[in-house]
Image (tube, rainbow, N blue to C red):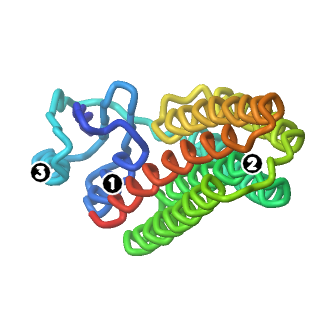
Amino acid sequence: MYKAVFKIDKMDCPCEENLIRLKLENIENIIHQEYDLTNRILTIIHTHNIKLIETAIAELDLGSALLENAETEYIEQENEDKKQRKALWAVLIINFAFFIIEMTTGIISKSMGLVADSLDMLADAAVYTLSLFAVGAAIARKKKVALISGYFQILLAVLGFIEVIKRFVGIEEVPHFQTMIVISILALIANTACLLILQRTKSKDAHIQASLIFSSNDVIINAGVILAGVTVWWLDSNIPDLVIGSIVFAIVIRGALRILKLAKN
């Protein structure tokens, strides 16, 4: 058994991780993969033929370099994998539930901030789904899921931007700031719960680390929507809501483009 350590300069989000997983999926001598997105390090436990693995990673043009390839002992930790899967399922369910809640209340309260945040929740749920698909699924199926997810998010975000423009140029009713604040506080609590669930795994696996990053970013976005709600109340204007909505829509599109990149490689 061997442990190969790669430095991959452009591996900084779950999309690059999944891109590499897809590329390595059909290499049979790989036993285990561990991704450290923070330090851009990929560790692979394999049985032989490091050149095949090295070539496959290099073909992705992500700035990879083999740092180490040495003999090692490896014990598969099935219980740890189950714990991680359980955590990913929990954050997936929470994110998808709040996508529905925020989309519904955003439409009713006429808040583009809530609508945009709901799409960010959907984007996160899509990435968690792809992470769960990373084990045991056919490569064609994973690519199909990624394509559908990416295009769907872009479609919704573009429709959101169109609605924002219409509200900027038209005479639009001020959104219900109380709903914005209350729902965003609930979403903030939900994302904090996601952070706690993921932190309890005490795992350095990339799926968990990436999920922690997403949930941390969501907390910041939730705080932004809360601030927008307070500003809407203070100024009696829909402009703060439209500004925060535009920012979050842009974040959603950026994430969707990364998912599409994953699906097309």
Q: Nearer the viewer, mark 3 or mark 1?
A: 1
Q: Is residue 86 visible?
A: no
How many residues crowd mark 1 within 10 Å: few (<14), some (14–19), many (20+)? many
Quadrant (top left, top right, bottom left, bottom right) of the N terminus: top left
Residue depicted at 20% across the width and 43% down the height: 62
Give the residue type at disc 2. Ile
Residue depicted at 86% across the width and 46% down the height: 176
SS at mark 3 in the image: helix
Where is residue 240? Give x, y as percent. 67, 37
Above-or-below relation of 253 to 5? below
Where is residue 41? Give x, y as percent. 30, 31
Residue 202 quadrant: top right
User: Considering depth in this image, is 33 or 146 the residue closer to the camera?
Assistant: 146
Label of residue 55 in the image: 3
Residue 11 quadrant: top left
SS at mark 2 in the image: helix
Where is residue 209? Give x, y as percent. 51, 33
Which residue does the numbered mark 1 point to in the structure image? 19
